[in-house]
Image (cartoon, helix red, strand yellow):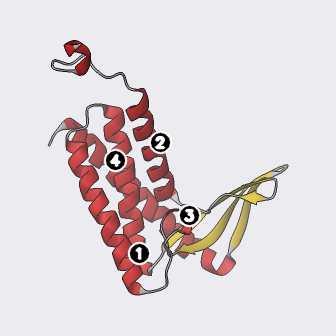
Amino acid sequence: MTPPLRLGLGLALLLLVLDQASKWWILEVLDLPFRRNIPLLALGPLGLDLTMVWNRGVTFGLLSGEGAWNQVALGAVALAVAGFLVHWLRRAETRLVALALGGVIGGALGNVIDRLRFGAVVDFVDVHAWGWHWYVFNLADAAIVCGVIVLVADALLRPQGGKPGSKKEAA
C-alpha cells in the first residue's frame, strides 16, 4: 500500500468511526429525535445548537425524496464517487491531497451508512447568527466540505512545473 493511500484511508477510517459514534450518541444517548433541539452556546447573536434533522437529500437537502429507491440511488452514487476518490488517492502527490481525499471518502461513506440504516442522513449541528441558521450538518458533511475546499485550493494554488517533462521546463 502506498504512503498516500495508507494516510488517506487511515483518516477516512478515523472519520468514519467518529462520525458513526457521534450519530449513535445523538440518537441513542441524547435521544435527539425526541428532544428535537438542545441549545449549546449563545454568544449574543451567535449560537450553536443540536437540532435533529433527517436529511433525505444530498448536500443542503438537494435531490431529497421519500422513496427507498431515492436513498439507494444516492448511496450508489456516493459509493461510486468514493471509489473514484480511492483511485485518485493512490496517485496523490502530496500528503495534504491524501488527507483531503481521505476526509471526503470517510465523510461520504459515513453518510452512505446512514442512508442504508435509516433511509436518511442524521444531521444535528445547527450553527446560527443574527437569526439566520446555516444548514444543519454532521461530522461527515464537515469532512467532505473541508476536503473539497483543500482540493480546490490545492488545484488553484499549488505551483505547477518543476518536474521533468513539465510545461514550465519545456518552455
Residue 57 appears in the figure: yes
Q: From the viewer's perspective, tell me whether residue 130 is left or right of residue 108.
A: right
The mark that comes first in sequence, 1 or 4, is 4
Alpha carbon separation for disc pair 4 and 2: 13 Å
The N terminus: image quadrant: top left
| Closest to the observer, 41 or 77 | 77
| Residue in the image at 36% along x and 34% along y | 96
Three-letter amino acid code of the residue under disc 1: Arg
Alpha carbon separation for disc pair 2 and 1: 24 Å
- The tag on residue 115 is 1
| Residue in the image at 51% along x and 52% along y | 142
Q: From the viewer's perspective, tell me whether residue 122 is left or right of residue 169.
A: right
**Could you tell me if the residues under marks 4 and 2 are in contact, i.e. CB atoms within 8 Å?**
no
Residue of label 2: 149
Q: Residues within 10 Å of mark 4 (few under 14, many from 20)?
A: many
Which one is in front in this view, the residue at disc 1 or the one at disc 3?
3
Which one is in front in this view, the residue at disc 4 or the one at disc 2?
2
x, y percentage for residue 8? Answer: 30, 44
Q: Secondary structure at mark 1?
A: helix
Three-letter amino acid code of the residue under disc 3: Phe
The mark that comes first in sequence, 3 or 4, is 3
x, y percentage for residue 26? Answer: 56, 69
Residue of label 3: 60
- Find residue 68 and report its image quarter: bottom left
